[in-house]
Amino acid sequence: MIKNLSIQNYALIENLEMDLFSGFNIITGETGAGKSILLGSLELLMGKRADYSVLYDENKKCIVEAEFDISEYKLESFFEENDLDYDKEIIIRRVISPNGKSRAFINDEPVNLTTLKEFSSKLIQMHRQFDNLQISSPDYQLKLIDEFGEITQTVEKYRSKYLNFKNEQKELDGLLEKDKDFKAQMEFWNFQYKELSEALPTIEKYEEVQNLFNNLSNSENIQLVLNKAYNELSEGEYSINSRLDALLNDMIGLNISDKKFDQVKEKFVEGIELLRESANEFVNIADRFEYDEAEIQELKNELDNVNALVLKYKVSEPADLIELKNDLQNKLKEQFDVESGIKMLEEKLRKDKKELLEIANKLSVERQKAAKKIKKSIEGILNDLAMPYAELIIDFKKSEILT
């Protein structure tokens, strides 16, 4: 029910506020009183094409606004389908700018004219002289049959199921579009992922190769220094270890009975042993870094390949390649998840469509039963009006698609 009509800067109206009440369904008045202007403003709320010429003041906006109580209209599904917030009291607003541009709103949420037309047609039935009544609308005819046959519960059950079905179909369409985009990139992503995985399994592996390359490249110097250290510590009569051993023997020969001296001497002995062990380890380490030109070249090729990929993928460092590889792995996994989601949704849609068709068939049977009762009732009334041969034909046509 319309509760209030507000008109600003429309035709001959500068500003008008009308409070309406239940049961108000007609506007009368002499020619020129402005009936057509009021109806014209309502037509703007019904999605009629806007015209710059309707502005009272060409420099100001035209605003037509109406408040409705829709608590009895059962329009929750419409709001859900169009992603609008439902309220029992709503405001429809149409704004026409001086430049001729038009905007429409339902409860302050912008909507296109198609949505506005669909919604307002459920609220407003405008009948002028020579206009057709709403009875000619198939939707209105079905509504009358549903109410007469008291089958609105079945209708609501169907609408709820159908809305759920459409939402699932919309979700499936989104997944199919996503799957299409994925498949267009899949071959390229697989190639990139394989290329990065082979060249750079982990950042730890890269660092290991880099360290080994640096060590082998410097192997000659490493061997020289470590062998020199061994020789200085252990080789010959005048090596460090030999001189320390001689010094230790001298200390042992001292006849000192002192606790502190014994502690220091013990540490000295430990130090000599550590140096001897270190000398042997230096030799072992030097042997590990034997110069191998072929191995060095192989490691260099691996590092060059990684550095080439850094340039190719326009990143700063090898660690960024690992991050890129992980992103590709996530995309490939998401593609698998999308395919699984499509299969699940398709199966659910098949089941839901079957249930929906069962409800639709039940609704069709109930409507045809109600139509027979309406036919009998109205033909009885027509007979009482001295029209014994009058016949009411209610023609049902099966829809090829679910609506």
Image (cartoon, rainbow, N blue to C red):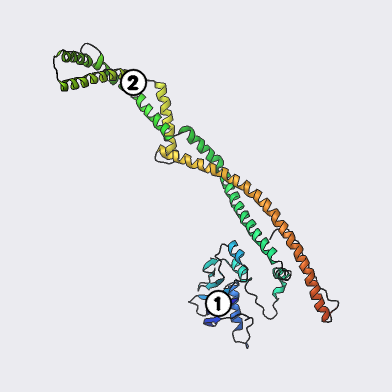
Residue 85 percent location from the top left of the image: 54, 65
Q: Quadrant of the N terminus?
A: bottom right
Residue 132 appears left or right of 377: left
Quarter of the image holding residue 372? bottom right
Name the amino acid type tagged 1.
Ser
Gap in angstroms between the C-alphas marked 1 and 2:
95 Å
Above or below — where is 248 with respect to 306? Answer: above
Q: Residue 285's mark?
A: 2
Q: Secondary structure at mark 2?
A: helix
Residue 38 appears left or right of 244: right
Residue 73 percent location from the top left of the image: 63, 70
Mark 2 surroundings within 10 Å by alpha-carbon count, few (fewer than 14), some (14 through 19), many (20 or more): some
Residue 318 percent location from the top left of the image: 41, 37
Which residue: 21% across, 20% down?
Answer: 266
Which residue: 51% across, 69% down?
Answer: 108
Above or below — where is 227 with respect to 80? Answer: above
Q: Quadrant of the C terminus?
A: bottom right
- Mark 1 or mark 2: whose residue is earlier in sequence: 1
Quarter of the image holding residue 213? top left
- Number of marks drawn: 2
Mark 1 surroundings within 10 Å by alpha-carbon count, few (fewer than 14), some (14 through 19), many (20 or more): few
In this view of the protein, can residue 397 be seen by the observer?
Answer: no
User: Residue furthest toward the bottom?
Assistant: 30
Q: Which residue is mark 1?
A: 53
Residue 1 appears left or right of 319: right
Quarter of the image holding residue 392? bottom right
Above or below — where is 31 with respect to 322? Answer: below
User: Residue furthest toward the top?
Assistant: 237
Observer-nearest residue: 311 or 39?
39
